[in-house]
Amino acid sequence: MAGFTDKVRNRTESIRSFISRDIWILDFSAMGKWRKRISLHFQAIIICTRNFFRDRIGREAVALSFFSTMAAVPLLASIIFVSGGFGLEQMLETKLLSTFPGNVELINFILGIAHNMVDATENGTFGWISFLTFVWLVLWLMIQIGVAFNRVWHVKGQRKIITKVAVYFGLFICIPFVILLFLSGWAYYIRFFEILDGKLGAFHFITRNIFWLIFYGVASLALSVMYKFIPAHKVHYRAALKASFLVGVVFVAIQYLYMGTQVVVTRISGVYGVLAFVPLFMIWMNISWQTILYGATLSEAFHRIREWEIAEKRLEEEERKELALQRQKQQ
């Protein structure tokens, strides 16, 4: 028993020594391409995990999950308000109900609250004050997302207020069209794979795997855009893309598990009604934001390692130039 304990202690000590010291003094010039890449990725994960817990980024995820829950319905109300200005309100609601036929009661409940918020604008000044307060919740969520990402990057300064207003106004205008395009594409996708699923027979599981593969690609692309453009810092897109590909696997797994929990919600909704949706929704939001912010921290780590590589290459070029000058003088 003592021998086994000593082996475990020695192995633990060797792992700790590798993580804290040995991996940072590796000679990459003697390594192959893939071994070097794996070592650099491992360094990035160590930096990311250390910074994530040291800077307590998880607290930002808790705050964002709360703000997201508060802003979910006001965001939908804002989308309905903007889409109504373009005559797309009825189309948007029809697409929502047809895309999620299993949650018609919940969607109608949320749409009813959103319509009440929009209808409040007809009650004069106080109605507009009420509506603008809800819009401010959405803007505050966007601001807090930027603050959280800047905290990951240790950026103290913020973008100019004019830039923020322009970006947020553009998002408010574009979001209804993006959602309509997404829901329309989703509807065509469902029809296509329903037809394909009937023809595949015993191989119908292929359609489900293709769905999650497409969802992984879309989620990774969206995360890479967030990691690239949200921080008030110049980010290498390569670093953002690497982080999004790695974190995207976990993010998709979380969405898969959350969809599975909807069966439980359906069963207990007979007792608690639509309120049964709220606790699981908040838990899902918290875990999702934890994953997204961990990916932001990972993109910062990849960016830092990329900067180190660039600095090393510049140093090597300077050394080569200096050596060439010395040889030229010796001739």
Image (tube, rainbow, N blue to C red):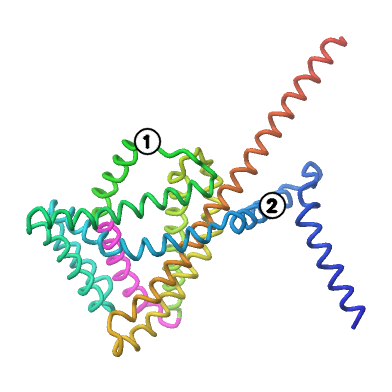
Question: Which residue corresponds to mark 2?
Answer: 43
Residue range (magenta): 179-202
Residue 158 in the magenta stretch? The answer is no
Q: Nearer the viewer, residue 225 or 62?
A: 62
Q: Is residue 13 left or right of residue 121?
A: right
The quadrant where residue 170 appears: top left
Q: Residue at x 18, y 57 (%)?
A: 131
Instruction: Residue 81: give x, y in percent of width and height.
Output: 17, 56
Q: Nearer the viewer, residue 226 or 177?
A: 226
Q: Residue at x 65, y 35 (%)?
A: 310
Question: Which residue corresponds to mark 1?
Answer: 160
User: In the drawing, what numbered circle is on residue 275?
Assistant: none
Instruction: Residue 9: give x, y in percent of width and height.
Output: 85, 70
Q: Is residue 205 left or right of residue 19?
A: left
Residues packed near mark 2 inside 10 Å, few (<14), some (14 to 19) or many (20 plus): some
The quadrant where residue 278 appears: bottom left
Q: Establish if 161 lies above or below 200.
A: above
Q: Nearer the viewer, residue 309 or 54?
A: 54
Q: Is residue 244 left or right of residue 122?
A: right
Instruction: Residue 35: give x, y in percent of width and height.
Output: 74, 52
Q: Establish if 156 lies above or below 73.
A: above
Query: Disc 2 on helix, strand or loop?
Result: helix
Q: Establish if 94 lies above or below 44.
A: below
Q: At label 2, which amino acid type do we have?
A: Gln
Q: At label 1, which amino acid type do we have?
A: Lys
Instruction: Residue 106: give x, y in percent of width and height.
Output: 25, 76
Give the Cα distance between marks 1 and 2.
Answer: 34 Å
Q: Main secondary structure of the magenta part?
A: helix
